[in-house]
Amino acid sequence: MQYRTSATPGQAPPHPSWAGAGLSDAMAAVVGGARRRAVRDGDRQVDTAHLLHSLVESDLEVRGAFDGGPQLARVLGYLVQRSIGYGLRWQDTQEGPGALPAVREPGGEGWSPAAAAALDRATRAALRRGETRADGLDLLGELVADPRCRAVEVLERAGVVTERLAAQVAERIAGRSSAG
């Protein structure tokens, strides 16, 4: 089976800029939650679906970007299903081709290239807006921007039109920026 990734085959992603001070406190909690979920699920690395699950569970702004309760319930239901059953087909595999190494943090946690790239892009997006730290909407926007990542696969299987979700995230970020 071919696994989704946005990384170029044979090319390891750069060292993550988000590994230090590039995340808000809430985002640091999301990253920690994604790490714990990967360990609990028995996965070899933290992937974009782990990040999505942690985001949806913990961030009110992220939940507000979805088209209401029924859509959010389907996403959460699919994420839970992935964790307890469907996700087993992904255990002992990496998000992306096996030739790509996981991005390692100083603590040794492995990140899929797509997850590391999404966190890095979220940090850069926040900096371009003049913010010092990325938040949940930044990360959700970057997850849905990668049509080949597992988070997008999960969203699409739950019936989310990712292009619409991306537009809603961008609108919320722009509205927040113009209000502040």
Image (cartoon, grey):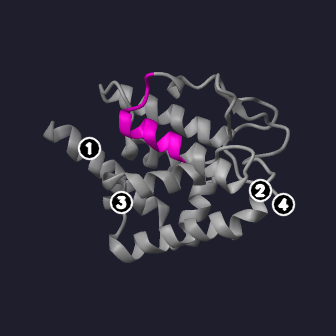
Which one is in front, 170 or 13?
A: 13
Camera-nearest label, 4 or 1: 4
Looking at the picture, how far across and down is residue 138, in whole percent? 40, 41
Q: Residue furthest bottom?
A: 70
Tell me which numbered mark, 3 or 4, is placed earlier along the sequence: 4
- Asked if the magenta segment contains residue 28, the reply would be yes
Q: Which residue is mark 1?
A: 174
Q: CA distance from mark 3 to mark 4?
A: 31 Å
Q: Amino acid at mark 3?
A: Arg
Write down the region rendered in magenta: 21-33
Q: Quadrant of the C terminus?
A: top left
Q: Relative to 116, say whether 80 is above or below.
A: below
What is the crowding at mark 4: few (fewer than 14 residues within 10 Å), some, or many (at least 20)? few
Q: Quadrant of the N terminus?
A: bottom right
State the mark number for residue 91: 2
Q: CA distance from mark 4 to mark 2?
A: 13 Å
Q: Amino acid at mark 4?
A: Met
Q: Which residue is mark 4?
A: 1
